[in-house]
Amino acid sequence: MVLEETKIMNDETVDLTPLDEVLEAFRDERGAIIPILQRTQEIYGYVPAEAIQHISKHTGNSVAQLYGVATFYSQFYLERRGRHIVSICDGTACHVKGAPRLVTTLEEQLGIKAGETTPDYRVTVEVVYCLGSCALAPMAVIDGQVVGRLVPDKVSKLVRELE
């Protein structure tokens, strides 16, 4: 992820300057909504509402069309996420072997619910359904790294050690 703190000045202001380069790269390509949204998300870590407005202005696609694409595909996030992403698997094998305890542990430790991001944007915790590594149950993916055979103390320690 290319997310740089300078791109998001605060919760209310998004620097749209880096987006202009993306829009210029796709200026002559009709129907390039998905790659434009993908690059937008690479820049900001999500697709900000201000970016959708900016993209609409420069591509001629309506805001509704852009939101339609962004909400249809699960790869796009419309809310700012944390610098660290913790995806706890709650597929059948992981659930049976204790995934709900992992989720509860992180919710209590971080003061957020699954699906939310800490107020300082340090960590986003999400529950996913089957990551395809049932032999490692219960497991999680933390910043792209698979971690298996988790217990509450271990997941808590791993998250504490993040940056």
Image (cartoon, rainbow, N blue to C red):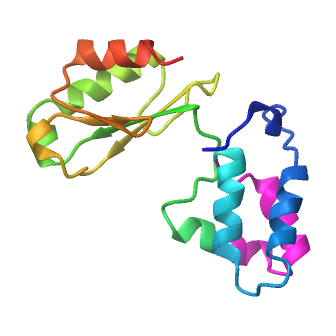
Residue furthest to the front in view is 25
Q: Quadrant of the C terminus?
A: top right
Residue 142 in the image, given as x and y percentages of width and height: 39, 33
Question: Is residue 135 in view?
Answer: yes
Relative to residue 131, is residue 111 drawn left or right? right
Q: Quadrant of residue 119?
A: top right
Question: Which range is magenta?
Answer: 46-68
Residue 4 to residue 60: above or below: above
Q: Residue at x 80, y 78 (%)?
A: 62
User: Is 24 on the left or on the right of 99, as rendered?
Assistant: right
Answer with left or right where residue 1 lies relative to residue 162. Answer: right
In the rendering, at what x and y percent does residue 112 appear? 48, 25
Quadrant (top left, top right, bottom left, bottom right) of the N terminus: top right
Q: At which x and y percent is residue 129?
A: 27, 51
Q: Eyeballing the image, is 27 above or below 105?
A: below
Left or right, 131 with respect to 93, comes to right
Which residue of the protein is positioned furthest toward the bottom in this rendering?
30
Q: Residue at x 91, y 51 (%)?
A: 17
Q: Residue 99 in the image: x percent, y percent?
A: 20, 33
Where is 24 relative to 155, above or below? below
Q: Which SS does the magenta portion mostly show?
A: helix
Residue 53 seen by the camera: no
- Taking the magenta stretch, the answer to whether it contains residue 87 is no
User: What residue is rendered at 46% in x and 40% in y?
Assistant: 115
